[in-house]
Amino acid sequence: MAIRTQLARLGLFDAKVPRYTSYPTAPHFAGDVGPDRFGEWIGAVPEGGNISLYLHVPFCRRLCWFCACRTQGTATAKPVEAYVETLQAELKLLRKALPPGVKLSRLHWGGGTPTLLSPDMMSRLIGEIRETADFAEHAEFSVEIDPNEIDAARLDALAAGGMNRASIGVQDFDEQIQEAIGRPQGYDVTRKAIEMIRERGVASLNTDILFGLPHQTRARITETVQKLLSFAPDRVALYGYAHVPWMAKRQQMIPSDMLPTPQERLDLFETARRLFVWDGYAEIGIDHFAVPGDGLAIAQKTGKLRRNFQGYTDDTSEVLIGLGASSISRFPQGYAQNAPSTSAYTGAIREGRFATSRGHTFKGEDKLRGRLIEALMCDFRIDADEIVAGYGVSREWLFRTFRDTAAAFDNLLEVTEDGLYLPEKTRPLTRMVARTFDAYDLSKAGHSSAI
Ligand SMILES: C[S@@+](CC[C@H](N)C(=O)[O-])C[C@H]1O[C@@H](n2cnc3c(N)ncnc32)[C@H](O)[C@@H]1O
Ligand code: SF4
């Protein structure tokens, strides 16, 4: 049977499989984690230890039709100013609860569009963050930048605050595609933004592009990738466009009949993937590429690549604290998510308490299954020795599980004496294989327990 047909039969085009940026995934979070539990977990961060911060800005000046992110349009500065004041208050609460001497390993601003903040708002937030924790040695401060929503003054404020990685949204350079997805962005606008970023000595550049967009063809994605490569980005995220108009209502503006078929999507991904690889980029997990000297490429080579809410990371800190509406924090004890609506989030912080509304406390096999999934998503293999040594399971159970998994995928996966391995041709199935280790996935029948 042709491999494509076989992969399709094994669930390749099942759009509902999670991207596993956490385990369990956010839809399985529940209300038993609230502000008190969050406060306890913050208090348990080791004195002088490293943490990372994610700061969410849920506003955009324009709302692109394709976008499935949690964000709201705003034409004025008023709601943004109120939000920034709330973030400052949240940072003050955090400062009181954190043990002394904590250092920042990573700081990421995402959204929405963090670059719609004014230079003054940016500087205030950076000041508040630095009073909460100093940057650790080799810390990274990255910001998601919309090239249509940036200027010299705002870049100056970010660079002065220590931004050393910029992440810019491109999606596609083709004008007809841009029109169809409601995201006009001339090539020169992107080029100018990149020049301004580099002029300020920002060492590293990430870019996002999408495959599976309306009107996209092999020829068009080839041209987009070639244009992107002319900027020599350090990292590229090549995300599959998720068309979920029942959730993201603005996607109803996108003509569904212009979307590529699942088979065409696979071709588009393959076309772009080959171009990046030909150009010397290392493949990072399921949807990223990085130049060989980049932190992600090094982490992948040394088995230190990890998965978190921003996708792939080389961050080694065990605590990631999410600030702002809907942000998710991760601790060794579990996950905690802030209230998703800006008004509920603001209300809680204004009353002087954390805005945690739900989450998950790790129990039973969570950490084991989380690691099995993470290893597949990062390395396309699971190392049996690591799992047996780190998670107290028997080799018998582990190998029985590997053999069952391989059998469920027509034995296209390899079980060796070292563990489970996904050969290159099966990698499009990675998320589907990962799902077989997901005990919370309701669509599956029973599991054999490891413990
Ligand atoms: C939340 S946006 C923030 C970036 C910034 N506001 C901008 O527009 O450049 C981050 C990235 O999410 C990705 N994204 C948004 N909607 C998506 C969708 N429906 N499917 C796949 N990726 C999507 C895009 O690649 C986008 O660059
Ligand atoms: S892609 Fe960026 S600018 Fe466009 S709606 Fe999404 S977050 Fe806002």
Image: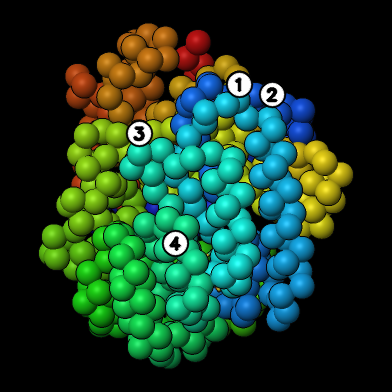
Question: Which mark, by number, is residue 40?
Answer: 2
Residue 156 visible from this viewpoint: yes
Q: Residue at x 25, y 74 (%)?
A: 231
State the CA–CA distance, disc 2 to disc 4: 34 Å
Q: Which residue is mark 1?
A: 44
Left or right, 156 with respect to 341, comes to left
Decide if residue 428 is on the left or right side of residue 154.
left
Q: Nearer the viewer, mark 4 or mark 1?
A: 4
For the residue carrying disc 2, how many other residues have a C-alpha within 10 Å: few (<14), some (14-19), or many (20+)?
few
Image spot of residue 434 (x, y percent)? 42, 38
Q: How far apart are labels 2 and 1 at the CA level?
A: 6 Å
Of tags 2 and 4, the one toward the viewer is 4
Mark 4 vs mark 3, foreground winner is 4
| Amino acid at the residue labelled 1 | Ala
Earlier-in-chain disc, 2 versus 3:
2
Which residue matches tag 4?
160
The answer to the question of whether label 1 and label 3 lie on touching residues, with beta carbons closer than 8 A, is no
Location of residue 259 with respect to 417 vertically, above or below? below
Tell me, yes or no, whether the two marked residues, 2 and 1, touch with CB atoms within 8 Å.
Answer: yes
The label on residue 356 is none
Instruction: Give the number of the mark in front: 2 or 3.
Output: 2
Position above or below: 306 against 364: below
